[in-house]
Amino acid sequence: MARFIDPRVDWAFKRIFGSEDTKECLITFLNGLFEDELVIKDVTFAKTEKLGLRPDDRGVVFDVYCITNEGKHVIVEMQKKEQEYFADRALYYTARAIVQQGIRGIWDYHLAPVYTVCFMDFVSQSPILKEFRTDLVLTDLQTRQRVSDRMRIVYLQLPLFDKHTEAECMDIFDCWIYIVKNMNMFEQMPFSEKYPVFRKLAEIGDLRKLSREELELYDEDIKNMRDIYATRKFDEKKGMEIGMAKGMAKGMEKEKLATARRLLSMGLSDEQVSTATELPLEEIQKMKE
């Protein structure tokens, strides 16, 4: 049985990265992710539900939403299943966090930067997401220079993280990704001696220390995640079966055409070749033409 919770599950993800008493986890992860760019000393958690500007507007619900000590807004999401417009979804979430900064009355349009971090527990089919990590920013097409720091989206495709042992992890960001991907399989929490935050993680992520209510919430999310994986595997299997069937049908059709050409070259009539190959008579006649 697993000793630790699985961070890829909604309840566990929010417990680790979205709780006031565990915000050290979020801070160290973000500082590792944006090393040499951000130095976050503290965060304040904001409401994860954002209503529309008008009563009939669509609202959004973030997994984790916080504001850093420097006033930067950070959204952190865990996505377990691909959507057709997943990349656009992240853009929409980021835009909503930007628009929500508008105020009534006199305003000079000064905006705080919004960072959106998307954990992806799948490999996307999007042509713009090919690597484990993809960073999107606003740049000039000609100069390739960044023109604004007010929007930043980072996609992290967990299956493409290519470090499979503790020894391969070179910094705290590598350690965090390695743990997020594998934590439910650990008997002991790795990297605890080097980074004290993982001692904290071991404490809050120990299944034996969960209350009965917490365990019920976690188990329900585990069931949902397993259903998603089972559905994904079924779809992949059906896709392979359909692909194989189409390939076999195409191969048989190609073989029939080759046989028909040989029979025609031997002088058999169109009707005889059609009967022998089970190809339509019209198709045999077109081949002769």
Image (cartoon, rainbow, N blue to C red):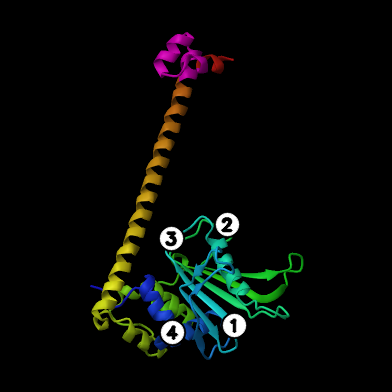
* CA–CA distance in space, label 4 to label 2: 32 Å
* CA–CA distance in space, label 1 to label 4: 18 Å
Residue 224's disc is none
Relative to 56, 216 lies left or right: left
The residue at the far right in this view is 142
| Residue 33 x %, y % | 53, 79
Res. 129 in view: no
| Amino acid bearing label 1 | Lys
| Amino acid bearing label 4 | Cys
Which residue lies under the disc numbered 2?
A: 127
Q: Earlier in the sequence, mark 4 or mark 2?
A: 4
Which SS class for mark 2? loop
* CA–CA distance in space, label 3 to label 2: 17 Å
Q: Earlier in the sequence, mark 1 or mark 4?
A: 4
- Tell me whether circle 1 and circle 2 mark residues in contact (CB < 8 Å): no
Name the residue nearer the viewer: 94 or 122: 94
Which SS class for mark 3? loop
Which residue lies under the disc numbered 4?
A: 25
Q: Which quadrant holds the N terminus?
A: bottom left
* Rendered view: 81 above or below 186: above
- Tell me whether circle 1 and circle 4 mark residues in contact (CB < 8 Å): no
- Residues in magenta, as a range: 260-283
Residue 81's disc is 3
Q: Residue at x 50, y 19 (%)?
A: 261
Residue 72's disc is 1
Name the residue nearer the viewer: 245 or 13: 13
Other residues around mark 2 within 10 Å, as few (<14) / some (14–19) / many (≥20): few
- Tell me whether circle 3 and circle 4 mark residues in contact (CB < 8 Å): no
